[in-house]
Amino acid sequence: MSELVLVSGEDEMILNMGPQHPSTHGVIRFIVHTDGEIISRAEPDVGYLHRAIEHIAEKCTYEGFMPYTDRVDYVCAMTANHVWASAVEKLAALPVPPRAHHLRVISDELNRISSHCIALGAMAMDLGAITPFPYALREREYVNDLLEELCGARLTYNYHRIGGVGWDMTDAWRDKALRFLDHFVPVIDEFDRLITMNEIFVKRLANLAVIGGEEAIAYGLVGPNLRAAGVAFDLRADMPYATYGDILPKIGWQTPVGSGRMGQTGDAWDRFWLRVEEWRWSVKILREALDQIQATPRGEFLIAPKRLRPKGDAMARVEAARGDMSCYVIGDGAPNAYRARFRTGSFNAMGLVREKSRGLMVADLVALIASLDIVAPEIDR
Amino acid sequence: MRASIVMAMLVLGLAGVARAQAPELLPAIAPPPPGEAHVRDLRPTKLERGDKLTVELDTGAPSGPVIILLRPAAVSAGKPEALALRGHGLGDGRVVTDIDAGVEARVGHDARWSGVAVQVTLVDTGKGDVWAATGGHRVWNSLPGDDYQLTFFPGSLRGLAGELAARHRIVIAGHRVPPTVVSAAVMIGVTLLILLLVAPLTGLLVVWERKIAGRMQSRFGPNRVGPSGWLQWLADALKLIRKEDLIPTDADPMLFRLAPYLVWMGIFATFVVLPLSEFAIVADLNVGLLYITSVTTFTVIGIIMGGWASNSKWSLLGGMRSAAQIISYELPASIALLSVVVVAGTLSPQELIRAQGGLPVDWFVFRSPFTFVAFVIYFISALAEGNRTPFDLPEAESELVAGFNTEYSGFRWSIFSLAEWTNVYVVGAIVTTVFLGGWQVPFFTADAVAASVGLRALSLVVMLAKVATLTFVIIWIRWSLPRFRVDQMMSLCWKWLLPGAFVAFMAQAAWTWLVATRPALDTGMRWTMFLVAGVLLGLFFLTLVVRAFRRVRLLHMDGRQFSLPFFERRLQKR
């Protein structure tokens, strides 16, 4: 990146934070200009994890690209599966059985829970509280157990298929999932007592790096970061896909938005708290989805396309854990895509770091990065 | 202050330094006859049966005889008499007060001091300030089979005019080994003893902390090496010693090497005055608390030195944070300690403990609301001084990689962490000594404890139990709380703790003056504080803990939260 300033002014020190640093959440680099502990500017330097995933999409078949989508965002791989499958289904106008839609919702939401486990646990750890991290990861293990039983993988799931999903769930699995939800709700309360409402934690995060609603829209923030800024926009409710249109009205959905409860709307604490709220909503969505799926015929979870040679272009949007994940795909009648493009949340969030880090302290920069829930592979793809 | 420096040297084993300085401090005294050696220092000296002993004292005081060395008049009766100095408490409450030159005085007994039997004549040399003693009296052996130990402790000199009294010259005939070598050997021996005793203690503390952390985080702690993992510290230490000893290319090699030892010394030097029990203390300095606050300052020098010498920006930031933090928090910590000192009227650790009692109502923490505030402030400040969570900013791993010790590895790193964990024990021991009654055994007086072997052993257990409890609390805090930001940390210190400590100190001084003539008021306040602060707060806290445990049981109904595979086992049980 040519505009990176590597020469320090007077009385300034350049701190090279990353690509190997405990709190950059992957391979990201920040060039931090500081005066003592106070940051005058922090330049994010992305590109250390670029793997040309979009180019790979042009080189292999539509079906064959599915495992690669896991790597777009490995913390929340299910939604990347989902958005690719949806985009290709739209492109080729393929039917999807209702049971597959339900399974997609269920797997997406489970994955959202586990992704937020990482985000919240890691953020608490970045602020020096070590115990919430293993607590969150313990719950993530349960989710991983469930997803492993569903699709055989614990991180890169490769579960969704073009035209459905890879495997059906069993009744025993459904019972396990329900029992996990029973267990998880009190755990959320416990997590709140442990860290969300902790005095020091609130003091550290309240009024920190406030992102207003208009600013968030201007920077293209999506997902929890956008909603924490007070903008009630959630693809699941506002542009329903899969079976969210049936589920959300039944559970009395209200898009959670940041309220400035501890400071100002859109501060770092709001972003943390919003993800805790999303846990609660995910549990409700899952309960309803696990209920509704009983009405769908068993075994009808995949209508595999015979000969996939679509022409034209299509775009699909899915609410991932880090917000609006979009995929735009152009087909030219070949078995592989002519062009595919993913739009992810973390990249835009990175754009805000330079603006928001001015005047913060080094410790606050860590909190800011963590509160935006940046996942390195999602930035670069 | 000078005494503290002397003791710090002792811990370091820097005999040479002490020796080099001693002659200049000594007044002009006629050199001893050839063939006799000098012991100028204050450490124990072995005497053989039949040794000729000459004692010369320079007390620096312009008047008044100050030394007596007593013959053990009644050894057979179990009451050997003691070496005592004027103004020195004899352990049984009596104090040497009035002795005339050349007159033997019997003032008390103390089992620890038995066996010294020297007749002394105090002679005015005419210089007005030197009181010299005898030459050539035979040592009596009062305890058959035992060696003598003639010991002058600077701590004994409380109450002497001119304080530094402690320039004794003891000339012992018949010793062939130069006493300086002997004293150097003693220094090194004591140092090794402290190291060998404390290092395993610290190692066990580390394992314990990791086990507690494991429990708190739904995972196993160390459980492989030794019985239930309790020897993990040994394996860790061996591994660390075998690691490559890395010094960064652009580091300042001398300072880089020196830094860990300064940190280590600052912490370990406190063990000189930390009482382990009624009988186990290396030196009961009369400036004990001052000494503690002085030597622990060495750590900040070491940390800045390491942070700067590493030539890494992360280390430098850690070092600077540490300097700001430790220097700031020393103030409220010292002032908080002072508010107890105004009650007890002493800085000596053992006498602070003796001024308290075995039961909580007699502890300084419940003496008044002000000492309670001082207790809380001291505890918080001590956490901050020791870089413990929530004040672990100098080594904040998520911000500064590892802070001041980022560039350290292997043995040097292990010295840093040894000092850090030892400090957890030290904080616990200081708090116990100053606020929580130290080794005092409930329902027994300090004298009763001193008199009975069983009770002395019990006093050791009591002390260690209190320290262990505090240590647990410190560990508990570490694994529960997030970290302050650097400006929050500073404003907490300067805006809250420092004024709070000062107000508590002034209020306690006023309160002490007020209750001096009204003992009933004092007793009433103690019981009120004990009931309110101790019982009610304690019960409230316990309820919270019990409730938390009940919730945990709800969350983990099968009690198998550690079993793998997690989910399967749990579901089968249900």
Image (cartoon, coloured by chain):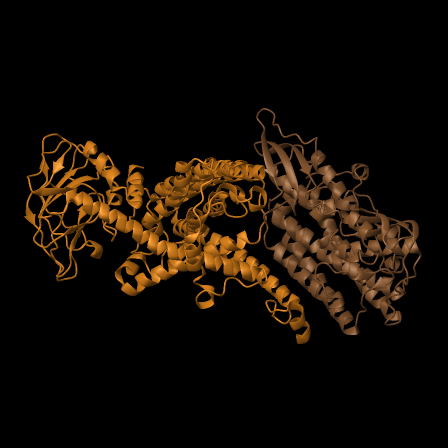
Chain colours: A brown, B orange
The picture quadrant where one finds residue A114 is: bottom right
Nearer to me, B277 or B186: B186
Q: Where is the N terminus of chain A found, in terms of image quarters?
A: top right
Left or right side of A286 for B53: left
Q: Position of residue B56 (x, y in %)?
A: 13, 40
Question: In screen coordinates, is B358 left or right of A138?
Answer: left
Disc count in the image? 0
Q: Is residue B506 visible?
A: no
Res A211 → quadrant: top right
Q: x and y percent of residue B421 in the render?
A: 44, 51
Vertical arrangement, residue A223 with respect to residue A37, above or below: below
The answer to whether one can see residue B251 in this image is yes
Q: Is residue B31 above or below residue A52?
A: above
Q: Position of residue A289 (x, y in %)?
A: 83, 64
**Residue at horizontal 21%, vertical 42%?**
B41
Q: From the viewer's perspective, is A309 left or right of B343?
A: right
Q: Nearer the viewer, residue A226 or A257?
A: A226
User: As drawn, which residue projects farthest toward the top?
Assistant: A10
Name the residue at 6% across, 40% down. Answer: B34
Residue located 76% across and 73% down the image: A172
Residue B17 x %, y %: 26, 37
* Front residue of A25 and B422: A25
